Image (spheres, rainbow, N blue to C red):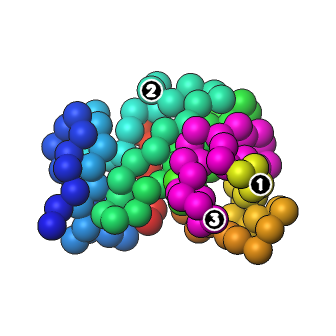
Amino acid sequence: NAPPVFGGPQATVAGRENQPLAVPVQAADADGDPLLYTADNLPPGGVRAYAVGDTMVAVFRLRSGELRAVDAVCPHSGGPLADGQFDAKKVICPLHSYFFSLADGTCLNGDYAVRTYPVREEGGEIVVEA
């Protein structure tokens, strides 16, 4: 049962070639594989959430320009982490104020954790390895 496609064709993410990715796809790499999102559409201080197979991933561009990616759903009560406040080190769940490290996913004030994902900018595109 494939997830719905939002704003573009189905794509895949590096490491998950057999699992659909539903995101607005802007371009393809040299091999013709769709990439996650254009870097121009995620400015410093911005965040977006994407469906990667059955997992939601939040991609953050820090004010320094660095990228971070973590599970987009808080493990405590399912809060949308992409809607939370964040800084260079953490994101705060908007439902119950759990703080998650953007570096390693650990919860700084509870017994929860989120997965982190390698993310990079490549040729003007943002690529998440999931």
Residue 8 on image: x %, y %: 20, 38
Q: Nearer the viewer, mark 3 or mark 1?
A: 3
Q: Pick the quarter of the image with the C terminus.
A: bottom left
- Residue 89: say if magenta: yes
Question: Disc 2 to disc 3, how far (Cα)?
Answer: 30 Å
Q: Which residue is mark 1?
A: 99
Q: Which residue is mark 2?
A: 41
Q: Earlier in the sequence, mark 1 or mark 2?
A: 2
Q: Disc 2 marks which amino acid?
A: Asn
Residue 17 on image: x %, y %: 26, 68
Q: Residue at x 28, y 55 (%)?
A: 21
Residue 80 on image: x %, y %: 54, 48
Q: Residue at x 51, y 30 (%)?
A: 42
Q: Residue at x 46, y 44 (%)?
A: 49
Q: Is residue 91 above or below residue 46?
A: below
Q: Which residue is mark 3?
A: 76
Q: Secondary structure at mark 1?
A: strand
Question: Disc 3 to disc 1, how far (Cα)?
Answer: 11 Å
Q: Earlier in the sequence, mark 2 or mark 3?
A: 2
Q: Disc 1 marks which amino acid?
A: Phe
Q: Residues within 10 Å of mark 1 (few under 14, many from 20)?
A: many
Q: Residues within 10 Å of mark 3 (few under 14, many from 20)?
A: some
Q: Disc 3 marks which amino acid?
A: His
Question: Disc 1 to disc 2, how far (Cα)?
Answer: 26 Å
Magenta stretch mostly in which secondary structure?
loop
Q: Is residue 22 above or below residue 55?
A: above
Point out the stretch of residues depicted in magenta: 73-95
In the shown orientation, is residue 25 left or right of residue 116?
Answer: left
Q: Earlier in the sequence, mark 3 or mark 1?
A: 3
